Amino acid sequence: MRDEQCEKGDIGMAIERRPLREQIKDVLLERLGRGEFNPDQPINEVHLAADLGVSRTPLREALIGLEREGIIISERGKGFRFAPMSPQEFRDLTTIVATLESLALELSPPEHLKRIAPELLEEAHAFSAPQAELSVIERYDDEWHDRLLSGCRNDRLMDLITTLKLTMHRYERVVVGDRQVLERSAAEHEKIAECLVGADLPGAVAALKANWESGMHRILEKLGAPEGA
Amino acid sequence: MRDEQCEKGDIGMAIERRPLREQIKDVLLERLGRGEFNPDQPINEVHLAADLGVSRTPLREALIGLEREGIIISERGKGFRFAPMSPQEFRDLTTIVATLESLALELSPPEHLKRIAPELLEEAHAFSAPQAELSVIERYDDEWHDRLLSGCRNDRLMDLITTLKLTMHRYERVVVGDRQVLERSAAEHEKIAECLVGADLPGAVAALKANWESGMHRILEKLGAPEGA
DNA sequence: ATACAGTGTGCTGTATACAGCATTCAGTAT
DNA sequence: ATACTGAATGCTGTATACAGCACACTGTAT
């Protein structure tokens, strides 16, 4: 952790100082994304702080920061733990994010959507190309959605979507690397983009919601969860 | 702060121990609601901790907890401050909450809505009654909306709505006590309830959104903000 | 008068210490 | 063997200490 800090005194380099708690949050999220922590796993502050090379104080502050994002839960006397995962939670989150992304799309200026629609379509096509590298594919979905919503000027909404997606990434990791699943995703992106090219916003919104709905089913299937509510 | 803790050893009383940081959060929210803190006001941790009778550590933890809820902002080297208020932020939040409440209403079981619709209508009428006490009126809006959405079983959605409303209460305090404004609110509640009594969910959703929209305009007017985006 | 450098002060961010709590283990009674 | 009680241990939540930073003020140069 300390090795990653910028060296003080370098000339010409903008020194960005971030609180340790923010840096710790990033590291924990990265490790979580790599599967180093399990759902419902208790966190031993002393051990983890030693592992990260910091004292317990900024670690606790980082964990409290992640608590509100649904990634960590805490209970007095028992400390912090990684949040459990459940199919119901995933359904709940998907419903919310689909609605919020749809809202962001609706709030986007039409001229902006008109401008980016061809790029979005081209990228959906490119993703389907068999020569695309798998490591590129894995990040494709988030970036495509980011670009789709890049016109939305409601800052709180975009912040909220980002935060909620952080929580959902724990579930999505189940399907990373499944090429067939991601190809279906690209076909759905094409559908959305085609609607935008044709200036059919309601159609695009409906296709976006369908994209989330089918994505939810794919992941629930992988989790071995029943389809019902 | 310490005087508010339960005495250890009382017989027959369930001892609920909550971390100090959670208790501090509650106190800060209450004081904020009473107008004791101003938007954009810096927080002196040493002074505030002394004022609350605790050490800086749980206060910092509480502030970090409130940061995610948009009530506090922090910057390295400058500490914490109460979030500024801006008409644009209020617009953004209102748009989000209106959408999320509408989603919650749509997710509510129809039989539940059918059952509570008459109560909702009755309460909207009761609110219009001139004999209602002003202090009762002030809490009316939140409680009415809570009951309206009491059938929604998406826990994350309800949690999110509650959180976002915490942030919005800073703005709504501007109009508390304005009887005329709140009477218009009740008329809008009646309209929503009437749609539910008539099993017209789309109509209720539209009326709910209109309720938020007009509420937004009322508050923006009070803030002296222009109507444009 | 204005601009710049240095110093002092108060505050912030983090490390460490300590008291209390939750859990586990050992000993005793039935 | 099982149940209960008390002690030990590890961990959590909070208090305190300390180093570094941000800002205001003072003195000096132009």
Image (spheres, coloured by chain):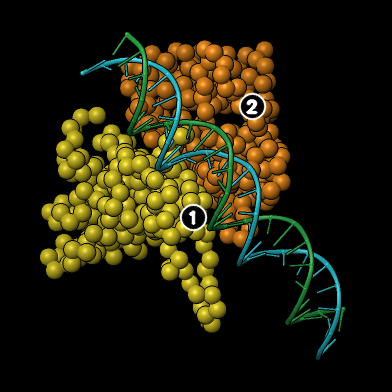
Chain colours: A yellow, B orange, C green, D cyan
A94 vs A135: above or below: above
Which image quarter: residue B101? Answer: top left
Residue bearing mark 2: B4
Subunit ID for the residue under disc 2: B
Q: Quadrant of the C terminus of chain A?
A: top left
What x and y, as percent, mark residue A41? 32, 42
Look at label 2 and name its amino acid: Glu
Q: Residue at x 55, y 44 (%)?
A: B61
Q: Which mark is residue A185?
A: none
Which residue is at 48% across, 42% downward?
B95
Q: Residue type at mark 1?
A: Ser
Q: What is the x, y in percent for residue B21?
A: 56, 38
A40 relative position to B74: left or right: left
Q: Nearer the viewer, residue A110 or A128?
A: A128
- Note whether B47 is above or below A198 in the view shown: above
Q: Quadrant of the N terminus of chain A?
A: bottom left
Residue A180 shows in this picture? yes
Residue drawn at (67%, 27%) of the image: B3
Q: Quadrant of residue A100?
A: top left
Pick whichever, A10 or C22, lies toward us.
C22
* Element class at badge 1: loop
Where residue A165 appears, as percent x and y from the top left, is: 35, 49
| Secondary structure beneath label 2 | helix
Q: Name the disc covering residue A55, or none.
A: 1
Q: Looking at the image, is B188 positioned above or below residue A21? A: above
- Going 63% across and 37% down the picture, which residue do you hit? B28
Residue A95 is drawn in which quadrant?
top left
Question: Could you confirm whether marks 2 and 1 are on the same chain?
Answer: no
Which of the pair A105/A218 is nearer the observer? Answer: A218
**Label 1 is found on which chain of the structure?**
A
